[in-house]
Image (cartoon, helix red, strand yellow):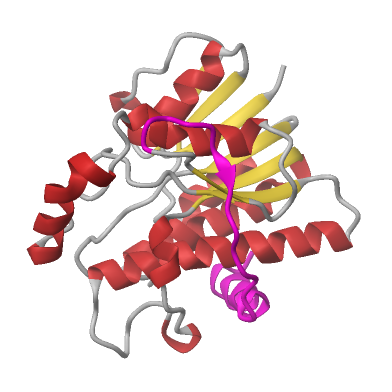
């Protein structure tokens, strides 16, 4: 039996992914901020508390893990939230979408036997990584810009993790996926003219079913894809997911070093 750990599995794409994997007969651990509010799907499932915005919670969760872990799905994320800092001093997008998953993955690596799947976004292509100001302390804050930067960080994290795993001779793979435009509620904090335009276009550009947005994640987690792959949707009608072209980024190693220092992994 394969064991999957899915962060942010209390709702949206994470819940859909957890439900599908459990229905296939796998063991699924749902890592969520508030377990009391989550009803696990039928099957061999377990709900555990994990707050990626709090590194102490990440360390506590990892310390409590025993046994092998076949697949870690870094799915949890926030989008376009107002500016705020976490208890660790991180801007919220970078905390939840990058620093938390970065630390969690590194702490769980001794248990991992299969792969790490990190969920990015099509908007990563618009991301601008400012290594000397990852937490938006010295520039005008942009909620969407912060989200885009964190999603680009997901891809750079996958790239560098893949490189390190390969160099160490590990059989564990690092891959990334994105859901396309899926109506899951993650954009509920997104406002302004851009938000109105996006929602007006939803019937044209969005996946017809939220379940279709989970297909690339499931594909990346279960199919025989190469390390450092980037899996996207086949089409908005739930077509077979496909591997997308992406370029390696020169800043991946430096982002890793900064992230390791800030999280003190």
Q: Tell me the quadrant of the picture where the N terminus can be found.
A: top right
Residue at image location 59% in from the left, 13% down from the top = 24
In the displayed structure, does residue 84 sit left or right of residue 200? right
**Boundaries of the magenta span:** 236-265
259 or 56: nearer the viewer: 259
Task: Tell me where residue 19 appears, x and y as whole percent.
Answer: 45, 19
Of 7 and 88, the residue lying toward us: 7
For the question of whether residue 87 can be seen, the reply is no
Residue plotted at (38% across, 27% down): 211
Q: Is residue 258 magenta?
A: yes
Residue 200 makes an appearance in the image: yes
Q: Which quadrant: the C terminus? A: bottom right
| Left or right: 79, with 51 as reference point | left
Residue found at x 17% / y 57%: 190
Q: Nearer the viewer, residue 242 or 99?
A: 242
**What residue appears at the point 17 percent right and 49 percent down from the top-left corner?**
201
Q: Is residue 163 shown in magenta?
A: no
Residue 7 lies, in percent from the top left, at 48, 39
């Amino acid at each position: 039996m394969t064991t999957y750990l899915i962060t942010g599995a209390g709702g949206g794409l994470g819940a859909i992914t957890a439900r599908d994997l459990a229905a296939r007969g796998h063991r699924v651990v749902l890592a969520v901020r508030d377990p009391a509010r989550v009803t696990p799907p039928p099957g061999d499932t377990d709900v555990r508390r994990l707050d990626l915005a709090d590194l102490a919670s990440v360390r506590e969760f990892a310390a409590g893990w025993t046994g092998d872990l076949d697949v870690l799905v870094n799915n949890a994320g926030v989008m376009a939230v107002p500016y705020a800092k976490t208890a660790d001093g991180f801007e919220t997008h970078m905390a939840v979408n990058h620093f938390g998953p970065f630390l969690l993955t590194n702490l769980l690596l001794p248990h991992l036997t299969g792969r790490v799947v990190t969920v990015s976004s099509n908007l990563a292509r618009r991301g601008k990584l400012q290594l000397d100001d990852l937490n938006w302390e010295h520039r005008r804050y942009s909620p969407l810009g912060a989200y885009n930067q964190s999603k680009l960080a997901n891809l750079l994290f996958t790239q560098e993790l893949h490189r390190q795993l390969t160099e160490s001779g590990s059989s564990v793979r690092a891959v990334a996926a994105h859901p396309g435009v899926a109506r899951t509620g993650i954009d509920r904090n997104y406002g302004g003219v851009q938000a109105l335009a996006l929602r007006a276009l939803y019937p044209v550009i969005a996946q017809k079913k939220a379940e279709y947005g989970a297909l690339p994640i499931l594909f990346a987690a279960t199919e025989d894809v190469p390390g450092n792959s980037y899996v996207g949707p086949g089409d908005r009608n739930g077509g077979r997911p496909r591997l997308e072209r992406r370029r390696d980024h020169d800043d991946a190693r430096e982002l890793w070093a900064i992230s390791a220092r800030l999280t003190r992994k």
